[in-house]
Structure formats: structure tokens, C-alpha cells
Amino acid sequence: MKNLPDKNNSESWDNIAPKFNKWMEKDDYPEKVLSRIKIEPSDSILDIGCGNGVITIPLAKKARKVTAMDISQKMLDILTVKAEKSKINNINIVNKRLEDISTAEIGKHDVIVASRSLNGVSNIEKELKKINQIAQKYVYITIWGADSRKFEKDMAHLLGRESYSHPDYIYVYNILHDMGVYANVEMLESNTRDYSTVDEALERLKWRIGDLNKFEESVLREYLERNMIKTHEGNLTYSQGRADWVLIWWKKTV
């Protein structure tokens, strides 16, 4: 984890917030996660790494209250605007990272959701224990699938860059097992992503790989122009760019 490029900082997410909001409009991932979360109208929910609210807003419509936590103020600003437009007033905003908040400070919650937000946490065992202490009913975590970063590795090789291995879901599962938490595991296979233009696809690829110089950008543009195909709807896509996620969830028993 210490060797990985640092994207788990507020500045990085603030910079990408407006673009990320547009990307999520074409992503089928939120719908797949939301369909698996069990909540009741009386529940309180903690959404860790809530981002622009793509998971938070639908949850807030069904639950008593939601605490939305994120390190990016720009992401939280987008979430706030969305909530106001939907006339939702049961969301409490917390501009902090999980590592910097105590169980006493955040309080107990019925349901914990950590959607794609724990991949950059180094001491993840400590935070999993914290999450398990906070939860009263259910915990839902999504983490990298076993080979979800293969595309990034291939692109790094194409550019002559060093590629990095990311810990995947099995590490989280095994740590939970050692903690005495026997979690359920579900593979969430994503559909291929659609893009309006090559420029749009390149912009998202730059985010996934990291900063590019002009030459590297031209190499990736040429790759996309050569490999992207047109869908029936007239959009562009490339199957290799799909990222699969794994849902790890458990019912709190103690």
C-alpha cells in the first residue's frame, strides 16, 4: 500500500469532483450495490467515502437519517446540492476520513456502507474493527475484485511505466475472518462503460492511471481510437476497461 500512488487525499478528489459526478451518470455500479443493501425506514446509516452522493441520496430516501462522510469538500458540496434539489433534509455531512474519526465521535449506526472507499486504507484491520464497532445491524463494503486492476497494468506496460499491485477483496475477507466476522462475498460484474467521445474516455483513463505527459496522452489516445467500438446507441466503449468490484457484507451478531 505504501508504494501506491496517493489518490486518497482531499485535493485529488476535489480536483476530480465535477468530472466524477458526470461519470457516475453512466455507471451501473451504484444500482447494483443499492439493490443489495437491506434497510428499514427507522434505520440510521453511515456512508463512508460518500463522494457525490450517488449512494447516499437513494439511501436517505428510505432511511431515517444518513451520515455522509468524505474527505473531499467539493464532493460533499455536490451531494448537498443534490439533496436540496430532491428536498432531502435527513443527511448529516462530515468532512473527515474514516481514519481520523473515533467511534465515540461518529456514534452508533444501524447500517454501515463503505462503497469503493477502503482501497487506499493502509491499516485496514484497524478501520474494519472500528466499522464493526459502529454497526448495529449490517455492514456493506465494496473492494477491488481479484483482477480489476489488470487494465491499468496493461496500460502502464503500454506506456513503459511501473505498474502497482493493489490489495484485493481476499485480504479484507481474511482479516475479517481472523476478527471472527464471517462475511458474505458477492461479485459485482460491471457492464462496459459507454462514452460519448474518445476525449471523454481518455479523461477517465487519465484519472485511473495517473498524470500523463503529452507523449503518453497521445499513445493512449491512439490506443483508444484503435480499440474502441460503437454501441447500438451510438456511444463508444471498450470491454477491457471494465472494473469488477466485490461486495463483502455481514450481519452484526454481537
Image (cartoon, rainbow, N blue to C red):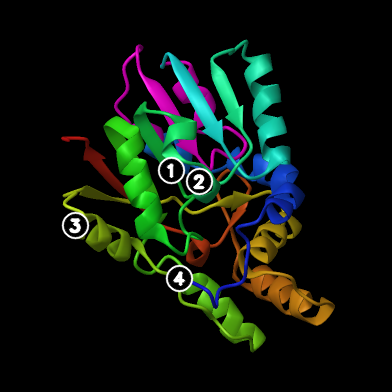
Q: Label 4 sits on what residue type?
A: His
Horizontal side of 173 relative to 61 (left or right) equals left
- Image location of residue 179, percent across then percent down: 21, 54
For the magenta stretch, what is the residue range? 34-62
Residue 143 lies in the magenta stretch? no
- Seen at 72% across and 59% down, the residue is 203
Sequence-first tag of 2 and 3: 2
Vertical position of residue 229 compared to residue 4: above or below: above
**Tag 2 secondary structure:** helix
Three-letter code, disc 3 = His
Where is residue 152 drawn, in percent x and y?
Answer: 54, 72
Judged left or right of residue 15, residue 232 is left
Callout in the foreground (1, 3): 3
Residue 189 shows in this picture: no
Residue at mark 3: 177
In the rendered image, residue 45 lying in the magenta stretch gets the answer: yes
Image quarter in which the C terminus is found: top left
Question: Cα distance, mark 2 to mark 4?
Answer: 20 Å
The residue pinned by badge 2 equals 98
Judge the density around disc 2: few (<14), some (14-19), many (≥20) Cα neighbours within 10 Å: many
Residue underneath mark 1: 114
Q: Earlier in the sequence, mark 1 or mark 4?
A: 1
Mark identifier at residue 166: 4
* 226 left or right of 171 in image: right
- Pick the front one: 122 or 27: 122
